[in-house]
């Protein structure tokens, strides 16, 4: 199918106008009740559930011709999911796309929040697989709904406590539950807990779309977002012994990359734009050079690092 | 049964000579983004991105909000001051929304700031389990430079911000302050002057 056919056969941004209005009304409710999951009539999208159908519907309802879109998957602009969703909106919404966090007005993300601080006016759209933070503790929707209504979150604290009694620390490392505006406990989607502090008092508008579960929720800008914890076991984010092997960043979320079958590995920023712009700024040698160097220099210390 | 109810008359679908959005897709998106911006920054006065040729009793901003987000799935209630055949026909023709006389089952309500808040006392505020099943109230005002101010804080507001829509029936302030207590239930308000909009979602705290 040529690009022309695709562009002219569908409404702008793929969804029909009535669907957009339905999603828009849900979004306004979601913003007005921070952290509450608003049910919406999720549509089938031309991609399987689990590939970001919720995020794509939210983006399609929000985006206009003057927007610049960035799409990331696990922090990277270059992975399959990110590339296909970016191309989807290039085709259906005739939109400018970028890989630069600061140039984007709308950022759709799967599982990461960009390292660079988001600014006022930006919209961050999360792809959410399971929006209900209490779902693995209580499978019945009628019950979890009642628990949210009564602000009954004891079960979640018991879960975190059981983590501590079993492992000595809170072992939840991603989809770490947060409390929004001192009211609703919310699943921040499977972002690493490293990103939780970025949600708090964020200048950008954060929208969450779960396509299969048909829920939309939101965090308005400058909203208190608190990770659940205990006084004697305060919330902590991940840390690494290494710096990023490519850009040397000491404070970004690192991915472990296996280099060969001899146990060599390196740790690099998961946010590809952040890493690249740091390398551009400091005029570091190209990635390929660093990769070879790293694989030559690294000794077999794989067992030591996790 | 009245045989007339079996077929659509012009009264049902509405008839108007006033145009709707120039470009239904992009205009609706632009207006929605302004409303989203307003709702996520309570108290901030935001320019309505376009002007609508609207009936006399409905200002351009209020009309464009309704054109952008109402359709056959939503029921709209018009206050005595805004309710007239021009407005009803305009909305029915352009959006297909149903108009209701009953505030307790509407999704959107439109009222003039001069009117009594008692009129909207029965708007749905949602339930503890479904607080989203509530109405959105559009209050038509002239400007946002009133002497009487409310100080807002809460989600979407960095520190505090003044809310000063005018003219506004003095009873509205008490009604709005009172309705803060039922969070997460409540009514979200969008103030619409002819050129600007400003939102007061239920999440904002309010000091008068």
Image: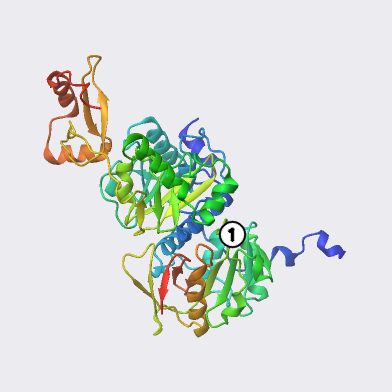
Q: Residue A182: x, y in percent?
A: 40, 59
| For residue B10, side relative to residue B185 (left or right) | right
Where, quadrant-wise, is the N terminus of chain B in this rendering?
Answer: bottom right
Q: Residue B183: x, y in percent?
A: 50, 65
Most foreground residue, A165 or A191 = A165
Q: Which residue is drawn at 14% across and 41% down?
A: A281
Position above or below: B27 against A245? below
Chain letter of disc 1? B
Mark 1 nearby-residue class (10 Å; few <14, some 14–19, many ≥20): some
Task: Read off the residue under disc 1.
Answer: B133
Q: Residue at x 42, y 70 (%)?
A: B205
Q: Residue B68: x, y in percent?
A: 53, 60
Q: What is the secondary structure assignment of the residue under circle 1?
A: loop
Q: Residue at x 16, y 37 (%)?
A: A279
Q: Answer yes or no: is residue B16 visible.
A: no
Q: Residue A184: x, y in percent?
A: 45, 54
Q: Which colour scheme is used?
A: rainbow
């Amino acid at each position: 199918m040529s690009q022309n056919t695709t562009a002219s056969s569908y409404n702008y941004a793929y969804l029909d106008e009535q669907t957009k209005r339905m999603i828009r009304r849900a979004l306004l409710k979601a913003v007005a009740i921070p952290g509450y999951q608003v049910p919406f009539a999720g549509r089938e999208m031309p991609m399987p559930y689990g590939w970001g159908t919720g995020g794509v519907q939210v983006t399609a309802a929000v985006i206009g011709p003057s927007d610049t879109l960035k799409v990331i998957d696990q922090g990277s602009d270059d992975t399959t999911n990110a590339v296909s969703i970016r191309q989807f909106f290039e085709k259906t919404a005739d939109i400018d796309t970028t890989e630069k966090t600061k140039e984007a007005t709308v950022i759709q993300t799967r599982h990461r929040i960009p390292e660079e601080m988001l600014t006022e006016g930006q919209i961050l759209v999360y792809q959410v697989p399971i929006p209900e933070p209490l779902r693995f503790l209580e499978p019945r929707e009628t019950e979890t709904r009642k628990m949210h209504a009564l602000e009954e979150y004891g079960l979640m604290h018991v879960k975190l406590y059981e983590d501590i009694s079993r492992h000595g620390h809170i072992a939840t490392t991603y989809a770490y539950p947060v409390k929004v505006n001192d009211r609703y406990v919310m699943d921040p989607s499977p972002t690493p807990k490293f990103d939780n502090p970025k949600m708090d008092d964020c200048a950008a508008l954060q929208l969450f779309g779960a396509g299969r579960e048909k829920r939309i929720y939101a965090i308005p800008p400058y909203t208190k977002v608190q990770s659940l914890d205990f006084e004697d076991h305060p919330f902590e984010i991940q840390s690494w012994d290494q710096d990023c092997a490519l850009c040397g960043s000491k404070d970004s979320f690192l991915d472990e990359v296996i280099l060969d079958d001899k146990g060599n590995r390196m740790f690099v920023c998961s946010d590809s734009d952040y890493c690249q712009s740091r390398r551009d700024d400091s005029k570091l040698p190209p990635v390929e050079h660093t990769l070879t160097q790293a694989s030559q220099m690294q000794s077999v210390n794989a067992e030591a690092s996790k | 049964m009245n045989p007339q109810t079996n077929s659509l008359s012009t009264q049902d679908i509405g008839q108007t000579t006033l145009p709707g959005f120039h470009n239904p897709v992009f205009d609706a998106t632009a207006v929605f983004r302004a409303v989203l911006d307003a709702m996520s920054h309570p108290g901030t006065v935001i320019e309505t991105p376009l002007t609508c040729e609207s009936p006399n009793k409905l200002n351009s901003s209020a009309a464009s909000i309704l054109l952008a987000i109402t359709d056959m799935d939503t029921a709209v209630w018009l206050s005595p001051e805004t309710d007239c055949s021009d407005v009803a026909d305009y909305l029915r023709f352009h959006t297909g929304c149903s108009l209701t006389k009953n505030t307790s089952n509407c999704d959107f309500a439109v009222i003039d700031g001069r009117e009594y808040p008692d009129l909207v006392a029965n708007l749905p505020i949602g339930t503890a389990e479904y607080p989203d099943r509530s109405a959105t109230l559009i209050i038509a005002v002239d400007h946002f430079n009133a002497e009487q101010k409310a100080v807002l804080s809460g989600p979407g507001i960095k520190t505090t911000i003044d809310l000063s829509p005018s003219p506004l029936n003095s009873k509205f302030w008490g009604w709005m302050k009172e309705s803060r207590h039922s969070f997460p239930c409540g009514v979200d308000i969008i103030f619409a002057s002819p050129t600007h909009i400003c939102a007061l979602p239920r999440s904002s705290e309010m000091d008068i």
